[in-house]
Image (cartoon, rainbow, N blue to C red):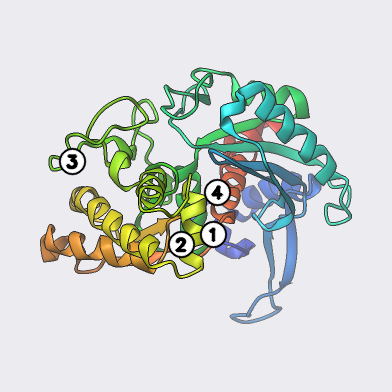
Amino acid sequence: MRREGARTRAEIQALTGLSRVTVAQRLTPLLQEGLLRETGPHESTGGRRPRGLEFNSDHGVVVVAALETTRTRAAVTDLAGTVLTHADLPVSVQAGPQATLDAIVGASRELLESDAVGGRAVRGVGVALPGPVDPATWRPSEPPIMPGWDAYPVGDHLSEALGVPAAVENDANAMAVGEQAVRHPRSPALVLVKVSTGIGAGIVVDGRLFRGIDGGAGDIGHVRLVDQPDALCRCGSHGCLAASASGWAVAKDLTALGVPAVSGRDVRALLAEGNPAAARLTREAGRLIGQVVAAVVSLVNPGVLVLGGDLASTPLLSGVRETLYRRTLPRATRHLEVTLGALGQDAAVIGMTRTVVDLVFGATAVNERIGR
């Protein structure tokens, strides 16, 4: 019901195979706890029109934050992922985990006082990080551009500060969840490629994230390019995709041409201004990214490929398509939709809300809450 919307009692019986009495016994405590609420009458198949039930997205709020290398967005959302209020903070991951997370907690407490929140209870907190996250511990796992963050107890830090359960996720994963939930809920397989200061991918299959054994799935920014052997990556290796095609790499090339830029955010601003050098270099970056994405598409065979992040633009999309279609068989792309992300900076925020809600309102947690 959280994922698919309102249901009548009869539909729940049909879907679960449970008896009417058992369904009533299960629904009663959920309604009493305020986890479900009744909706208006549904279409009748004869007799009185049945009333529907849906997950109560106003039962509380979630505090979420999406970290970038040079800035952070903190927000408060309802349980459906609607952003009620937000703040953009000039907080860099270079400041280290304690200072960054303390800043997020401080901003979140201020946001919770907003009229838009209306005093609703906080049910959980989530944060998206620009690096790999171990899914077993919610801790960063050797993040290449986050010095001092490796194995830091991010979830524990936030949970202790705000007094609620915490979830931590890679930012590309969170964005993939957000885009899939809002824009492509019927797609059985979606890949999102985030191109900002770094490059990463999130993979959602059958509505679930594929994280890999240690949370390293989708770390395509450090796939080596054969024709770029001398490009030095910020991870210390040579030839990584991110060394030649990330926002940081494009910014460096722009600076060499006399167009000052430091990060993917600067490149985004230049693209918005119509800067021809930024457009040309972004398209070239797209061609390189397409080389790696072609392998991902051939392996996963997704229905949707979403490009997100600071460099998500028409030039990037054009470059990726140029290489992608040349390097894959028609079977792999016959039903593939290649598109720009639709949610912008809120993709990771919405995705983190979904992740937190899955944690706090999953079957195990709800059964414990109602004493089952």
Q: In the rendered image of this protein, does residue 121 appear above or below residue 314?
A: above
Which comes sooner in the sequence, label 1 or label 3? 3
Q: Amino acid at mark 3?
A: Gln
Distance, label 3 to label 2, CA atoms, is: 28 Å
The residue at 75%/58% (across/down) is 37
The residue at 36%/62% (across/down) is 277
**Badge 4 vs badge 3, beta-carbon distance below 8 Å:** no
The residue to which callout 2 is attached is 341
Tell us which disc is closer to us: 1 or 4.
1
**Badge 4 vs badge 2, beta-carbon distance below 8 Å:** no
The residue to which callout 4 is attached is 348
Distance, label 4 to label 3, CA atoms, is: 31 Å
Check disc 2: other Cα within 10 Å, few if <14, some if 14-19, many if 20+. Answer: many
Check disc 1: other Cα within 10 Å, few if <14, some if 14-19, many if 20+. Answer: some
Which comes sooner in the sequence, label 4 or label 2? 2
The residue to which callout 1 is attached is 344
Q: Amino acid at mark 2?
A: Gly
Quick one: which residue is furthest to the front in this view? 258
**Badge 1 vs badge 3, beta-carbon distance below 8 Å:** no
Tell me which corner region of the image, top left, top right, bottom left or bottom right, holds residue 48. bottom right
Distance, label 1 to label 4, CA atoms, is: 9 Å
Tell us which disc is closer to us: 4 or 3.
3
